[in-house]
Image (tube, rainbow, N blue to C red):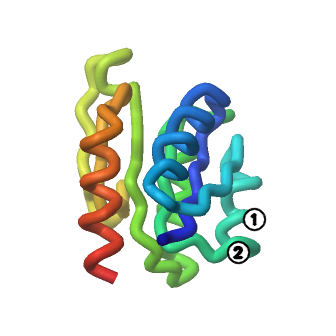
Amino acid sequence: MAKILIVDDDIDIQESTRICLEAEGHKVVTAGNRSDGMAAVVREKPELIVLDVMMEEADDGFTMAQDLRREGIKTPIIMLTGVSKAFGMNFGKDAAIVPVNEFLEKPVEPELLKAKINKLLQKK
């Protein structure tokens, strides 16, 4: 199965997502902030990234996704956020501002997350 990196400052989200994905046979690594996430991408070379929007800064997920794409890293990214519900803002995929493959609202149902992950991994 695939190596998946979860970058989220919420330890409960990290753990619940890790458990869900490991049950599917994936190897999961985690990071709690943007800088650790960037280092983990280089060190671990994940096949897919699950990325939170708001961490230490409100736009850390957006910035990390932009940085990865600027560096030529094409690893599929699923962005998870609670921003839309919390603040009434709607975000979606955008090649420049939100360069991700999927954008899902927290809390995401495990079956939906697994389906999106499997779809992206099959495209590789």
**Residue 34 in picture, x, y percent from top left:** 67, 50
Disc 2 on helix, strand or loop?
Answer: helix
Residue 109 placement, left or right of 35: left
**Residue 23 in picture, x, y percent from top left:** 49, 48
Labelled disc at residue 5: none
Q: Quadrant of residue 77?
A: bottom left
**Residue 30 in picture, x, y percent from top left:** 67, 50
Residue identifier under label 2: 42
**Residue 57 in picture, x, y percent from top left:** 63, 35
Quarter containing the C terminus: bottom left
Residue 33 placement, left or right of 7: right
The amino acid beneath tag 1 is Ala
Other-residue count near label 2 (Cα within 10 Å), few / some / many at <14 / 14–19 / ≥20: few
In the rendered view, would you say 18 is above or below 12?
below
Using the image as rendered, state which of residue 66 and residue 33 is in the foreground: 33
In the rendered view, would you say 72 is above or below 1?
below
